[in-house]
Amino acid sequence: MPLAGAAPNLAGMSRSSPLWGRLFSATLALGVIGLAAWLLHRYLHAMRWRDFAAAWQALSARAIVASAAATCVSFAMLAAFEMQAARLSAHGRVSLRRAAFAGVVCNAIGNMLGFHAITASAVRYRIYGAVGLGAGDTARIVGLAGMGVGLGFAVVITGALIWQPTIVDGWGRWPGLGLALALAGLLAWLGRSPRTLRLFGWTLKFPDARAAGLQMAIGGVEMCGAIAALHVLLPAAVAPSFVDFLPVYVAAVLAGLVSHAPGGLGVFESILLAGFPQAQRPDVLAAILCYRLTYTAGPFVLGSLAFGAFEWRLRRRRRAQTVAG
């Protein structure tokens, strides 16, 4: 993408990290992948094909449409993150329409290919570079958008703990209240004066309290949309309550991120299957594969086509400028 040129600049922070840090990250990723592969093999070996086929055929069109709708909600919130990040980091230099386009396309491609910090950032660099934004501006947008996603995780986990999902066995309320106080403290800290962070040569300007509060709200909706995209595909006889399902889903997503596997493939599935008894796993696997189509593969295909159209228009415009010049 002159993407090859963008990736080194945007990945500079990871290359500047100590050798022991990179080795630990690689070892952790390999360990997670190995454990997931072992679990997945174990679960699939114990599963009968006809049970999975019956579960796949039982998926209703209504549930699939609901999953696609929840996916649209999630990606709309990712676009909102990007617009806010672009407004704060490059105000007046990039349109909100372009930012929304970048937010949807880069996440659609990054979710499928994995290594999100590199793949999604490279796509962003290409889109924003067309209007003159450099690697530094793009990295700041990446940082703020990523902060929004992180705050979304925190808000959803906080709400779930306070609501007391079954998995916490009655001890979640106090940790949930502690996280709520931490988030309130963060808003108070951001509200005192402009906050910046300088790390590995990059300067990141934090949003103010109002913008961070908006990020929390957007992030909560985004995470709920992503979770709902899978939850609605589970049969009623199998599906736990939304609050009980949330911690399992979040754990699967985080394990996929740590593994750096493309789209968390294999890791995501094994963690989710581990949260259900063997008798229910054919239904869960069918729901996961359908979710992979509605939330991962579908947006990837559409995002790739949109990015291809963007590239075609960009090259056509530059060719026309060269001829005119």
Image: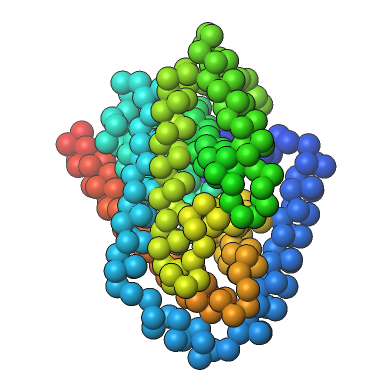
Q: Is residue 43 above or below residue 227?
A: below
Residue 137 spot, x, y in % from top left: 46, 27
Q: Position of residue 113 (x, y in %)?
A: 51, 58
- The x, y position of residue 33, in whole percent, is 70, 63
Q: Is residue 167 left or right of residue 97?
A: right
> Vertically, is 192 above or below 125?
above
Q: Decide if residue 199 is on the left or right side of residue 109.
A: right
Question: Measuring 50% from the left and 76% from the top, which residue is drawn there?
Answer: 283
Please report the residue visible at 61 percent of the width from the left and 84 percent of the height from the top. 47
Q: Residue at x 51, y 87 (%)?
A: 51
Closer-to-camera residue (35/285) = 285
Q: Is residue 85 left or right of residue 160?
A: left
The colouring scheme, among rainbow, by chain, secondary structure or one colour, is rainbow
Q: Residue at x 34, y 67 (%)?
A: 63
Quadrant in which the C terminus appears: top left
Query: From this viewpoint, is residue 126 visible?
Result: no
Q: Quadrant of residue 40?
A: bottom right
Residue 259 in the image: above or below residue 265: above
Residue 70 x %, y %: 35, 54
Outermost residue on the right side: it is 20
Left or right of 234? Residue 307 is left
